[in-house]
Amino acid sequence: MTGHRLALLGCALAVAGWTSPPPAPAAGGPLRIIAFGAHPDDCELDAAGVAAKWAALGHKFKCVAVTNGDIGHSVIAGGPLALRRRAEAGQAARLLGIETEVLDNHDGELMVTLENRRKIARLIRQWQADVVISHRPNDYHPDHRYTGVLVMDAAYMVQVPFFDPQVPPLTRNPVFLFSEDRFQKPNPFSGDIVVGIDDVIEKKLAVVAAMESQFYEGGCCDVPAGGLPTDTAGKEARRKQVLDHFAARFASTADRFRARLAEWYGPEQAAKIKYAEAFEICEYGRQPAKDEIRQLFPFLPAR
Ligand SMILES: [Zn+2]
């Protein structure tokens, strides 16, 4: 037993003695952002605007769906739905100019396990992330909650060499952010960083349109009363209804955080912003001062 343990330790030491340390993040190269959503559509709904803006400036953004979404529809499920949703996430990524990955965990069954913690930590390390985005752990959906917990559980471990000796640890802890939600208990979302996305709203709405199984068709639980239309005019009306709904949702973020927008953009510019995305700074991970936030979100105006 002792010999076996020593052999394992020796192996870990050998692997941990990587020859070249990972490059320091944000040292003049592109920023690297990784966003975790529970299902193929969450990261896109929460952060497609900032993703498009980062990508347009040459920075690297990756969306990870932690489950494959294979029960997220009213009439199809399993492998065929998972493949369809992976294709939709791929189309969204092409529209935004980002990378995407869908993990093969069943929808509705995500658990906080050591294996999943290791997987999330490894993805953050491999991406050499400067910024990590996920759900808060206060949420109606268990997969959202547990995605949030898994990312928080990885927030320190990404730096601990022997947590996963196979992949070099990060030398600088990323900034961890939560994406917006409307849950109030035990505490409401705080919207520390709010970004105007008017310049990329058409792109974000194109992403919504591309995720047809979820929004046009209504996913598992929002199929339109009376079913989906079959005639051309009805289909067009349904498309418009979906895009209007989401445009109003993205506009409501700007209204909800108008005062915070004014802090970042100044009152005059903030008053004109119609659509926004908001993020809360997680207490774990690096705690950025305002100047660093402007470096990490280089599309925020300099002040
Ligand atoms: Zn979801």
Image (cartoon, rainbow, N blue to C red):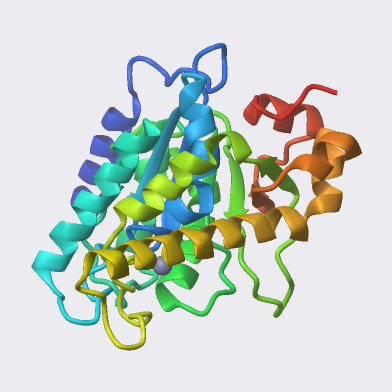
Q: Please state if 24 lies on the left or on the right of 94 as rendered.
A: right
Comparing 97 with 271, the one in front is 271
Picture quadrant of residue 236: bottom left
Residue that extends furthest to the front in the rendered view of this protein: 233
Looking at the rendered structure, the number of numbered marks drawn on it comes to 0
Q: Residue at x 60, y 55 (%)?
A: 250
Residue that extends furthest to the right in the rendered view of this protein: 267
- Vertical position of residue 13 compared to residue 185: above or below: above
Q: Residue at x 88, y 36 (%)?
A: 268
Q: Does the image show residue 121?
A: no
Q: Quadrant of the C terminus?
A: top right
Comparing 54 with 15, the one in front is 54
- Vertical position of residue 38 compared to residue 270: above or below: below
Q: Please state if 77 lies on the left or on the right of 292 as rendered.
A: left
Q: Residue 145: x percent and y percent?
A: 49, 71
Q: Residue 167: x percent and y percent?
A: 32, 35
Q: Quadrant of the N terminus?
A: bottom left
Q: Residue at x 60, y 61 (%)?
A: 248
Q: Residue at x 42, y 21 (%)?
A: 22
Q: Please state if 3 lies on the left or on the right of 168 as rendered.
A: left
In what quadrant does ligand 1 lie?
A: bottom left
Residue that extends furthest to the bottom in the rendered view of this protein: 226
Q: Residue 238: x percent and y percent?
A: 36, 68
Residue that extends furthest to the left in the rendered view of this protein: 80
Q: Does the image show residue 189?
A: yes
Comparing 293 with 117, the one in front is 293
